[in-house]
Image (tube, rainbow, N blue to C red):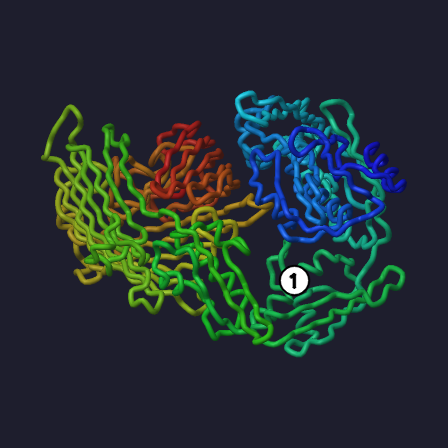
Amino acid sequence: MKHLFFCLILILSGSPIFAQVTENTTVADSTAGKQSSVVIDYSDPRQCVISGLTVTGVNYLNADQILSLTGLALGDTITIPGEELQSIVKRLFMQRFFSDVGVYVDSLVNDQAYININIVERPRVSQWRYEGVKKGEQTDIEEKVRLRRGSELSDYVIKSSSDLIREYYVEKGFLNAEVTATHKEDTTIKNAVQVTFNVDRKEKVRIKEINFIGGEQLSLLKKRFAMKKTKDKRLYNFFFSKKFNKKEFSNDKQLLLQKYHELGFRDARIVRDSVYQIDEKNLGIDLVIDEGKKYYFRNITWTGNTQYSSAMLNSVLRIEKGDIYDVVTMEERLFGGGKTQQGNVSQIYKDQGYLFFRVVPVEVNIVKDSVDVEMRIFEGKPATYNRIIINGNNVSNEKIVRRQVFTRPGYLFSQTELERSIREIASMGHFDQEAIMQMGSGFNVVPNQVNNTVDIIYNVTEKPDSQFEIAGGWGGNTFVGTVGISFNNFSIKRLFDKEAWRPVPLGDGQTLSLRFQTNGTYYMALSTTFIEPWLTGKKPTSFNTSIYYTRQTASTYYYLTNDQFMEVYGLGIGLGTRLKWPDNYFVFYNQLDIKRYNLQDWGYYFMFTDGQSNIIDYTVTLQRNSTDQIIYPRQGSDFKFGLQVTPPYSLFRDKNTDYSAMTEAERYRWIEYHKWNFDASLYTRLIGDLVLMTRANFGYLGYYSRKLGYSPFEGFMLGGDGMSGYNTYGADIISQRGYSNYSLTPTIDDAYAGRVYDRFTVELRYPVILQPQSTIYALVFLEGGNCWSDMRDFNPFSIKRAAGFGVRVFLPMIGLLGIDWGYGFDTDFSGKKGGSNFHFMIGQTF
């Protein structure tokens, strides 16, 4: 400032000065650190032509770059002295590259000026360092501040980076964190420094108490729960973070006011909020609330509606005269979202193509505590789908995605069909289920109101869904090895395409799986399955076929025998199709199975020991699955009813047939039964990603002839984790946590005789990780079930109870893994109490 003031005095006095123009008090010569010898008369400005132009003091930058910033060039005419030279100095300073800038006239011959620009570059930072920072935190901070080695040092960079580092720690709850920056010369590099950010986090500050003053119409507990992220140190907030976040606090205040608005307190407001420090570790918050007067709806009118009558719209809105003036619920029923699961006004319009529909609720009259609301509607014209774009399918054939969606070019836009399409893509299993559901990144709706069309863009993210299994387990008092592979996006069409074998042909959504289990002597199983979800490629008709073989002997690790064994051969073929009625969530399956059991001196599990049994059964299954995804469903339901029947051979025999006189081989040569199954699961989103799953299961194995009795096969074995360490056929293995394997299954003459069972489950789930690479969620459960040997003994209220907790891990290359701890409260069929049990599972759900 002194230097500038001195210059002004000289200019006003008309005295001659040297030809330096600078904004810094330091005076530098263009060559030797002295002033130029050229004398300029400020009282007589001259028009000069630039005949020489040089730049000195350059270390890192290029001289031509600096000249380009000045705008000067040889041959230009400038006024000396004049404002142009001063503006050049200011322009260079604004680049933040220089700590000093000077413009000199080295010589002045007639009207020929030789100008030198002398700069002092800011020092470059050779290294950024952090003190008082943990290694993991340093990585996060470096990503946040994005500082580069070799960048220039400036006060702006230091201050902005220090603020970002402090903000990082404040978000973590260190509200009193301090960040200071120091720098020292780097002796190994010219004009370079090393900068160190010194972080003192101090103590973590948590919210000790939140005090609500006023607003008595809402209970204290409801006020506290209304604030989702801002919690104090109370016992019921044990699992919540107590740190203070300014942004979350602002959002929580709005949520608190929403609770008052739901109760009709239209004018509710937070008069004052105070955030204060109690001590170095604790924070206090005071909120002063004025709830105002309670209001009620009076008259609701509609304008601009031509497609639907006012009565129809009122039936969707579901608000009557005299109802509490709940603006929050009104907006949910107009625009969707929130707690309501029923239809809304916007949806019924958009399902008919009115994508550009708008409705604006306007308070037209307020009389005392009553409010008149006018719903002003702009319907617009129906929109049709123009382009349906699918991006990101690097492995999967585009046709397998396109056939799943309900949005088709030329069809009228439908909000419900769009949501269903997203669900169908998520349920395919080939793409990241979380990513596709995100508006903007997962899918986009691009409307064009000029021509009343809309483009839909689905951005799918491929994930590895083929699974390779190599495992060992303990079952039947012996070690069992397993090797299996499942290609869940197989392409049989490309089987003979050499380019497709990378490592196998993929992309058409088919499933091909092979599995082999053995322990060498006791047990061996081999199975193969193929599934084509769209048999004709045009309609959702699935085809599946499977072949399997199992051999089990009485051998152990110390006793080898081939005289006692059970063999099972099987072949299955099935067709399934999606129905249009009652709605298109229904699927109807048909399955034909042929099985042969070959037993020799086999005194395990079944009611006969020697002979061959043949089963030909036909299964029909009706299923309705509306869950939003496969791995971690948050909403929807899954209902399945199945009936499996064999021919009633006994009805074709003589009524006086004496089955007791037959040998076991004769009696059970052709197995007959009818088998009923019912499974129901319901998923309810509670808060965020917290999900309540409720499930009920029922199964019944019946017979055609009481004289012949029950089938020795196809019963139910209840209890444990549903895994035996090896696969077996002849029974449905049903898990029941809290009890050992099969311990809840009745026996007759040492043979399992479960002919009817039920099971009820309530499970609370919360995700830990929801990523394409892995999905992990924790759960707690209550479960009860039982099994009976005869339908006449069935009592749905006589159940074996259990409770516990567990975790599930889904890895694309392996499948679903899980471990549960369950405690059984009742006794099993051996008279032993269930007690504490750990359960492991692979590739199945409990």
In the picture, measured across the screen, residue 368 lies left or right of residue 302, that is right
On screen, residue 479 versus residue 375, left or right, reads left
Q: Mark 1 points at which residue?
A: 335
In the image, farthest residue toward the front: 110
Q: What element carries label 1?
A: helix
Q: Residue at position x 59%, y 75% from top?
A: 450
Side of 673 where 437 appears, left or right: right
Give amino acid for label 1: Phe
Question: Which residue: 52% across, 54% down?
Answer: 441
Q: In the image, what residue occupies the spot 61% across and 76% down?
A: 381
Residue 527 in the image: above or below residue 295: above
Residue 670 position, x and y percent, is 17, 54
Residue 253 sits in quarter: top right
Residue 801's x, y, as percent?
47, 36
Instruction: Determine if residue 525 is in view.
Output: yes
The C terminus - image quarter: top left
Say whether residue 782 is visible. no
Front in this rendered view, residue 625 or 152: 152
227 horizontally vs 759: left or right = right
Q: Which residue is drawn at 66% across and 29% down?
A: 32
Q: Quadrant of residue 294?
A: bottom right
Q: Residue furthest bottom?
A: 306
